[in-house]
Amino acid sequence: MGDPRRKGQQLGGRHEYVVIDESHFRHKRKADAATSFLRAARSGNVDKALDHIKNRIDINIANQNGLNGLHLASKEGHVKMVLELLHNGIVLETTTKKGNTALHIAALAGQERVVAELVNYGANVNAQSQKGFSPLYMAAQENHLEVVKFLLENGANQSLPTEDGFTPLAVALQQGHENVVALLINYGTKGKVRLPALHIAARNDDTRTAAVLLQNDPNPDVLSKTGFTPLHIAAHYENLSVAQLLLNRGANVNFIPKNGITPLHIASRRGNVIMVRLLLDRGAQIDAKTKDELTPLHCAARNGHVRIIEILLDQGAPIQAKTKNGLSPIHMAAQGDHMDCVRQLLQYNAEIDDITLDHLTPLHVAAHCGHHRMGKVLLDKGAKANARALNGFTPLHIACKKNHMRSMDLLLKHSASLEAVTESGLTPLHVAAFMGHLSIVKNLLQRGASPNASNVKVETPLHMASRAGHCEVAQFLLQNTAQVDAKAKDDQTPLHCAARMGHKDLVKLLLEHKANPDSTTTAGHTPLHIAAREGHAHTIRMLLDGSAQQTKMTKKGFTPLHVASKYGKVDVAELLLERGANPNAAGKNGLTPLHVAVHHNNLDVVKLLVSKGGSAHSTARNGYTPLHIAAKQNQMEVASCLLQSGASANAESLQGVTPLHLAAQEGRPDMAALLISKQANVNLGNKNGLTPLHLVAQEGHVGIADTLVKQGASVYAASRMGYTPLHVACHYGNIKMVKFLLQQQAHVNCKTRSHIPRNYAVKVNPPGLRY
């Protein structure tokens, strides 16, 4: 005979139940919930965040950059949100992909109250990111004086260097944050970092003391704990007398600490002409680079020192020198809105459309910063108004994104293209609509921008505004011929976008403008399906009031009630039922909402459905009732609810499979006991004559076999092919089961059409089976 495991004979074969391939929607639902939770944290929407926490969102979920809710709330300064997240158990020291904690981010953003709360909660003030940045370093870098002071008072160690050797003092010196520099230098009364005596003399321009100190210790390049020499300090404080003394005593004019900052970098940033000339006369390297590859010319340009730029260029400074990010001096001058510096650099033939690694020109930088006068200087000198960055953004895209109206006007007057598209097909109008900048949107439309332009996903500006929840922008677009039912690549309309995000005001607006409430995506989802999936009851009510049909099915045969049942949205399911949804609507495979709710173990939805007329006897195309599913998946509470609602413990599928067959096969002793207590027939065979005992014999579930036998299951029951449970146990080599069945007086010589159990034992598993 053939192998009894073959599908045709189905000896012990599993009867698999597949409801639907839900993996796509499950992952999408989790991703959308995570996005909504992180957006709530970032915007300070405590109620929304708490709703997600109540719904068991992973409170530590993070975006693709590793930023979780605490990081985002800390950055934006939402103290109440920070406290709620901490009280609800978010991990305080979780780091982003760059190794930043929430304290790093709050310190970088200058959020004093958040910094205080995090430290009070026990945040490590000396935590270092992947690059070695500490919270103190970040606060010092951004000139957040009060944050620096608070961190120092709470144990921050200012001698901790980055991997490039920068300390908080070093970066404060480089950035020219004088108050922070003074605080760091003078903070020493409690045993913190002190400057060596020669550095203090250099700071105070005290040549007499410096001379005495050099007599006792002739090394003029003694280092502070932060890695700077006295000449660095003299250059920062523009103390010429002590600088000359140090140089005369042999100070290394090109001394390079780990961070790469030379005295000439500092003097160029400070803008002291005499100091710069002194250092150059003593051999300072004009093209010296810091760890970030900043030259002295970069420092002068960033800080707006025209005279220093001229001196450096006359001495041969490289005008096109690039930082690690590809910034040239002209980019830095544009960033600082230093128009005279830009003019000076252009006089020396700086490339006006020079690009960074991201292909940003100085005009991009000016547009980003909103420096419209700088933009005019560049455009008047021939800058390309439609230069494209690596992602395709033009200066006009950037001005629209940042809501810089005057920059936008300027660019349009200089022939910037309204139809320019990014790599993802976004026009400036798409960008402005998504950001919610109504004035920009109005201006662009008045100048001829197309309200129905589509990106690579075939999304219009109205899609973008609808997704982002910008009602006024959407209204203006609709008033200016935007197509209300424009379809994106997957046939999503703006109404789908608004419904997914729960923007009920936008849903109302779109419906008022005759949006089709039953428009379907390529997968057959209407806005009602999508709102049901997301649990937006208010949006659903609005859609139903707008004549959305509940009977519409997706391509997989799901009504909105099926979707709500799948995702456990009880409030939505209740609303749909109140508004006439059929609790027994059969989908493509005969699945009712109750089948779906059971499959996903959504007990509250199961209770609701049966209370509203959902039939516990309904069968799918394969004959499975909801109880079959619950039995297979060992959902005890769900099964109890179904049985209390009249479900039959002996319901048979098309193959004659009962819930007890499935519980037995899956090794579910508690479920088997529950079903038996509800009069499940222990000797009922399926279409092939296999009883529950046959199936446990196949799987080796001795405990369940014992329960079945005690409840009257026959050890002699034979399948259509003549197989007894003992045949099955022998075939699969389940020795313990064989012993158990023999103890129950199973007939060892009982024949099938061709074999007795002993033949199977010898044939299939000769070494292990004994009688």
Image (tube, rainbow, N blue to C red):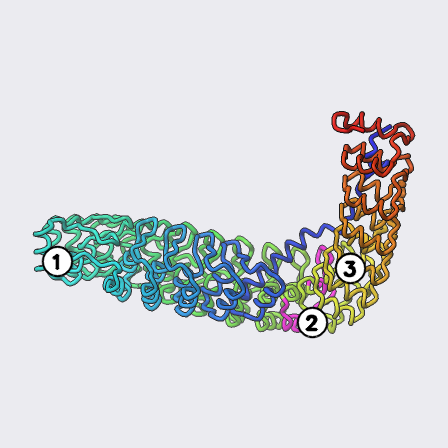
Q: Work out whether residue 361 or residue 211 is closer to the camera in this orientation and state it.
A: 211
Per the image, the residue denoted by label 2 is 511
Give the distance between the C-alpha atoms of the residues marked 2 and 1, in whole angstroms.
76 Å
At 55% from the left edge and 68% from the top edge, which residue is drawn?
Answer: 445
Q: Work out whether residue 665 or residue 80 is closer to the camera in this orientation and state it.
A: 665
Classify 10 Å Cα crowding around label 3: few (below 14), some (14-19), many (20 and above): many
Which quadrant of the view contains residue 535? bottom right
**Disc on res. 553:** 3
Q: Is residue 282 left or right of residue 104?
A: left
Q: Position of residue 80 (x, y in %)?
A: 49, 71
Pick the quarter of the image with the N terminus. Answer: top right
Q: Amino acid at mark 1?
A: Val
Per the image, the residue denoted by label 1 is 242
SS at mark 2 in the image: helix
Mark 2 or mark 1: whose residue is earlier in sequence? 1
Q: Position of residue 441 (x, y in %)?
A: 53, 69
From which residue to which does the magenta span run?
A: 502-530
Q: Work out whether residue 27 or residue 559 is closer to the camera in this orientation and state it.
A: 27
Q: Work out whether residue 356 or residue 149 is closer to the camera in this orientation and state it.
A: 149
SS at mark 1 in the image: helix
From this viewpoint, is residue 32 visible?
A: yes
Give the distance between the C-alpha atoms of the residues marked 3 and 1, in whole angstroms.
84 Å
Q: Is residue 654 left or right of residue 370?
A: right
Which quadrant of the view contains residue 756? top right
Classify 10 Å Cα crowding around label 2: few (below 14), some (14-19), many (20 and above): some
Give the distance between the C-alpha atoms of the residues marked 2 and 3, in whole angstroms.
21 Å
**Disc on res. 449:** none
Q: Is 515 within the magenta? A: yes
